[in-house]
Image (cartoon, grey):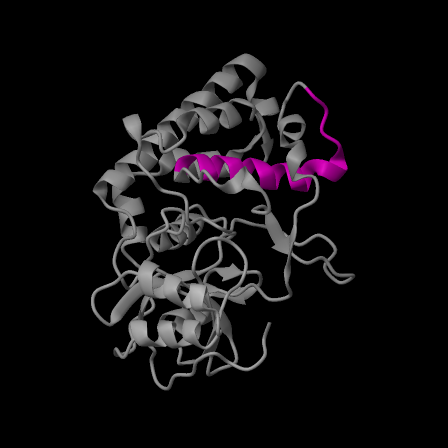
Amino acid sequence: MEGTPDATATGNADGGEPRVVAGADGTSSFLGVDERSILRRLCDGEVVRMQRNTGGSTLSFRVWFADGGRGLFKPQQTNSVANFRAEIAAYRMSRYLNLHRAPPACGRTIPRSMLQRTADATGDVTYSERVMREVLGRGEIVPGAMIYWVPGGLENVPGSERYPDLLDTTKPLADGDRTLAADLSALILVDFINDNIDRWSGGNILRQRATAQNPAPPMLFMDNGAAFTIGRDNMGARPTDQSQRLARISRVSRSLVGRLRAMNADSLSREMRLDPLGSPVGDNGIAAILARRDRLVQHIDAMITARGEAAVYAFE
């Protein structure tokens, strides 16, 4: 899929001046790469090629930067499960909770003409018309999320469907399953507060492709475009599904739950506002996140009362 480029550009794709990359101070990394360098590229790197990204029902574009790095641009669009702001918010939440599992993402604008040229160059009239009709923005400027392209290819995480047994304290947990169980526990807790309703629809629990040198890559918290709704009583778009999944979880990370307990509106809002396009979630969105956090903590406290702290806090 990396043949002749569909579009080229010179200079900053959005035509603006380089921006300060906030929230990347050299103290954190994603898959071993300094997030500061990743964000510099995503936020301000010169785009030299763009190409249609195939697969899925939403519109997105593969991006090549002048320094050889790659990204994925998800523009603002009519499809409700392709909220680019949710991708940015998921990255910021992952940083805030010190997990670093959601790929770095930066709010950025791209000229509409560049996206349309990319679509037209495919020769697919239906796709070209979709881009013309579904991509949103003001005039020539289209906002979106520029997301880090995970190198090495992706694969489904084996065994993820076993989460009800792996995370139930009434059932034994084999030593060989502890890493998988810890990853699934963190994913489900974070998806609950983020209200990611699309995780279990198929093919959305991913990791880098395993190799002989890296036989068990870490689970990645990807595909977050359907997250961060508010819903009735701040419980999101599908509160029943989310609550039923949470109810099956009784093994959690002590440190993650501690960070969730400490979360407050001021500190979370500060993290979200670090994106160059401003906070991807408004005040109502922050309130909804905190309401879901409170519901999550109530569940964990009930599990501790019923089964004991040592059993529930199964992971550091």
Q: Quadrant of the C terminus?
A: top right
- Left or right of 54 in this view: 90: left
Point out residue 314 in the picture as x, y percentages from the top left corner.
61, 30
Pinpoint residue 223: horizontal percent, then vertical percent.
49, 50
Q: Can you see residue 45? A: yes
> Relative to 148, is 168 above or below?
above
**Of residues 236 and 32, which is closer to you in this image?**
236
Observer-nearest residue: 103 or 311? 103
Residue under the point 72% across and 59% down: 214
**In which image quadrant can residue 40 be found?**
bottom left
User: Magenta segment, which residues?
Assistant: 171-193
Residue at the far top: name it.
306
Q: For residue 285, which quarter of the picture?
A: top left
Residue located 34% across and 62% down the image: 144
Quadrant in which the N terminus is drawn = bottom right
Q: Position of residue 96 (x, y in %)?
A: 40, 49
Q: Quadrant of residue 8?
A: bottom left
Please indicate whether residue 72 sits to the left or right of residue 209 in the image: left
Furthest residue toward bottom: 10
The residue sitting at the right extreme is 212
Name the residue rendered at 56%, 47% in the picture. Answer: 204
Q: Is residue 22 visible?
A: no
Q: Position of residue 78 (x, y in %)?
A: 33, 53
Q: Residue at x 55, y 82 (%)?
A: 4
Q: State whether the magenta stretch is mostly helix, strand or loop.
A: helix
Q: Is residue 81 above or below residue 284?
A: below
Is residue 246 found inside the magenta-colored segment of the image?
Answer: no
Tell me if residue 288 comes above or below residue 268 in the rendering.
Answer: above
The count of marks equals 0
